[in-house]
Image (spheres, rainbow, N blue to C red):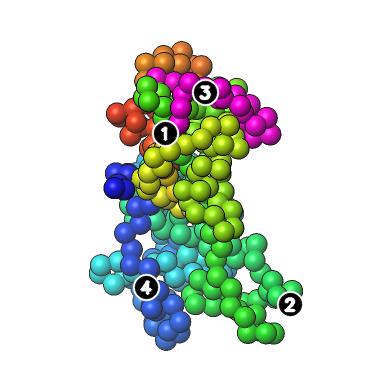
Amino acid sequence: MSETLQWLALARGTLDRAAVRRKDDAWIEAAWADPRTRVLVVEGGRALVHLDDPSLLLVAPGEAPEGDRYLLGVDDDEVAYFAVAGQLPVVEGAEKAGIRRVGALLDDLGSGLLTHAVALEHWHATHRFCPRCGGPSRIAAAGHMRVCPADGSEHFPRVDPAVIMLIQDDDERILLARGPQWPENRRSILAGFVEPGESLEQAVAREVLEEVGLAVRDVRYLGSQPWPLPQSLMIGFFARADGSLELRPDPEEILDAAWFTRDELTAAIEAGEIIAPGPLSIAAQLIMRWYGGDLPSMPPF
């Protein structure tokens, strides 16, 4: 039976996304004119944040800069929230910050707003032309679709599913590995993108076999969270493998891999030999579920 993770930093949005309102131009116009409406300005994946709280700096529609506009949703009091992709102003007491820096520090509303806004900003910035005819497309559905004026085709934000899996053996050890682009002491669990025509469970088995040469069993779903850096959905699993078999890391994907008991992982982190993922990532949450709590020297994000 599947279970959900108790806390995922980027899966905490509290708004009603108001999808039924996105094509209601009269409602969108009225919501934008409502002085209660709040706007999050994003530029290059960053927003203004009060770091002492921490909280997002939200402005009234009349204070927002020019730019693409996206409806993010409405709260329980029917207050509408929008994002505008525009130039961030200079505001005393606020700093420009992105998801990696503050995603785990914001409250549920703030985390959801920033994650949603950054995902839409990136997609619109990289999909301005129709993939059918190559002509310029326009924003529609309050930022959740693009339409080609030439052929009428509709295009929706892209999301790339990726599996991430904590592999354990029968001695309750977990497998940690280092990618070729990482610092020498950085370690995490295995992950990879889902291929066309492949189930999530098949992707878990394929990625583990390709990256370290192990066959897995007992693949079990735990939870998922958006990762708009730039456009992934990370889908977390537990799985088991035979820890007595030789690890065969793929040199293009994995520089080294090894099994760790809880005591060995604790000692390695405390000695500075390993830096584990921060709590923003689903990787850290999977490891913490196995470990039984926060890891030693866990960073705040």
Residue type indicated by callout 2: Cys
Magenta range: 241-261
* Cα–Cα span, label 2 and label 3: 52 Å
The label shown at residue 18 is 4
Q: Is residue 58 magenta?
A: no
Residue extending farthest to the right is: 134
Q: Helix or strand or loop: what does disc 2 sit on?
A: loop
* Amino acid tagged 4: Ala
Q: Which residue is mark 2?
A: 133
| Pointer 2 local density, CA inside 10 Å: few below 14, some 14–19, many at least 20 | few
| Residue 214 against residue 203 in the figure, above or below | above
Tell me how far mark 4 sits from mark 2, CA to CA. Answer: 31 Å
Residue 55 can be seen in this image? no
- Tell me if I can see residue 217 in this picture: yes
Name the residue tied to disc 3. Answer: 245
Q: Which residue is mark 1?
A: 240
